[in-house]
Amino acid sequence: MDQVLCGVPRVTDENVLVGFDTADDAGVYKLSPECALVQTVDFFTPIVDDPRTFGAIAAANALSDIYAMGARPVSALSIVAYPAKLGIETLQQILTGGAEKMREAGCPIVGGHSVNDPEIKFGFSVSGIVHPDRIWTNAGARPGDALVFTKKLGTGIVQTALKRGVAHPDHVEASIASMQTLNRAAAEALAGLEVHACTDVTGFGLLGHLRELALASGVSCEIEAAAVRFLPGAIEYARQGAIPGGLKNNRSFFECDVAGAGSLAEEILNLLYDPQTSGGLLAALPEAGAAEVVKKHPGAYRIGRVVERREKSIYLT
């Protein structure tokens, strides 16, 4: 996509505070000295069998980009691709799940668009607002910052195990609960603190999104692999080879910029590359702020620190 976008013409505007050239989670446009508009869009094919649950996960995933920018979601547009031959009952359940999650976030759905498509796809375009001086991006991490993460890893591997028919129902339930959990509480725990950089961990996995943060900030990051938390069953399924295709792509693309991988068990390394759906927030902030977040938010924990730029973006310990 980077190769495609480099040849796409763009309109320059001094009010564009964050555009697509920085690999951030959302675009930001300054409306006034006190208010900026944050915009994102995300949709995907079903990752669970229950349509209502799928709708809720799609909504939580789309909202996550708004929270990762330090913004408050204010409106959403639904995006639906659906085969007409399936009838309306399943579609109603998908839309209901999405609407319920948007209601939980206090974000009204104001419209949307649908097309007849042989493959189901669903998601949202979400708009949020934030003060222009309080935007979180992935480009401000500083040496000495602590790195805090707010969810456990492993949704991609657990869902792959489910497709193979080897996942325990309790493990699937835990994974679904994580994917349906809004990052609202995590963002609220970070609000008011000196957040230097923030992103949400989704399709590129923890190491892929961490690399983006490191490159954008001109720093490197040291990660304590033993500190990273995983969803129930995820390590065992990784040992069994329940590896999603996206994980293989992430590892192939990002491992050239990661040092210390040889010291880790293969299943742990794979989980660090595992593509997440509706994953947690990854934030860089001073040590005191990190301690405050961990105290305020039960899902938050410290996974490493930011250091001066070295040869590689990520160093695993």
Image (cartoon, rainbow, N blue to C red):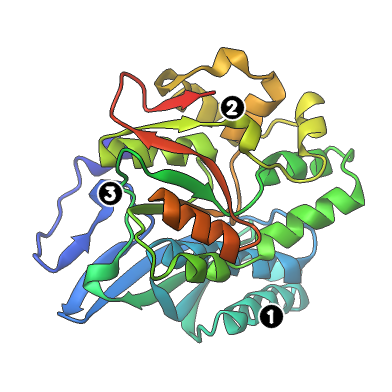
- Assess whether mark 2 and mark 3 are in contact (beta carbons under 8 angstroms): no
Looking at the image, residue 128 lies above or below residue 243: below
Q: Position of residue 242 (x, y in %)?
A: 76, 31
Q: Residue at x 82, y 51 (%)?
A: 172
The kind of residue on which mark 3 rests is Gly
Report which residue position mark 3 lands on.
140
Front-lying residue, 252 or 130: 130
Report which residue position mark 2 lands on.
248
Report which residue position mark 1 lands on.
96
Q: Which mark is residue 164?
A: none
Q: Answer yes or no: is residue 108 visible.
A: yes
The kind of residue on which mark 1 rests is Thr
The kind of residue on which mark 2 rests is Lys
Q: Residue at x 8, y 65 (%)?
A: 14
Q: Quadrant of the C terminus?
A: top right
Separation (CA) of disc 3 from disc 2? 29 Å
Q: Quadrant of the N terminus?
A: top left
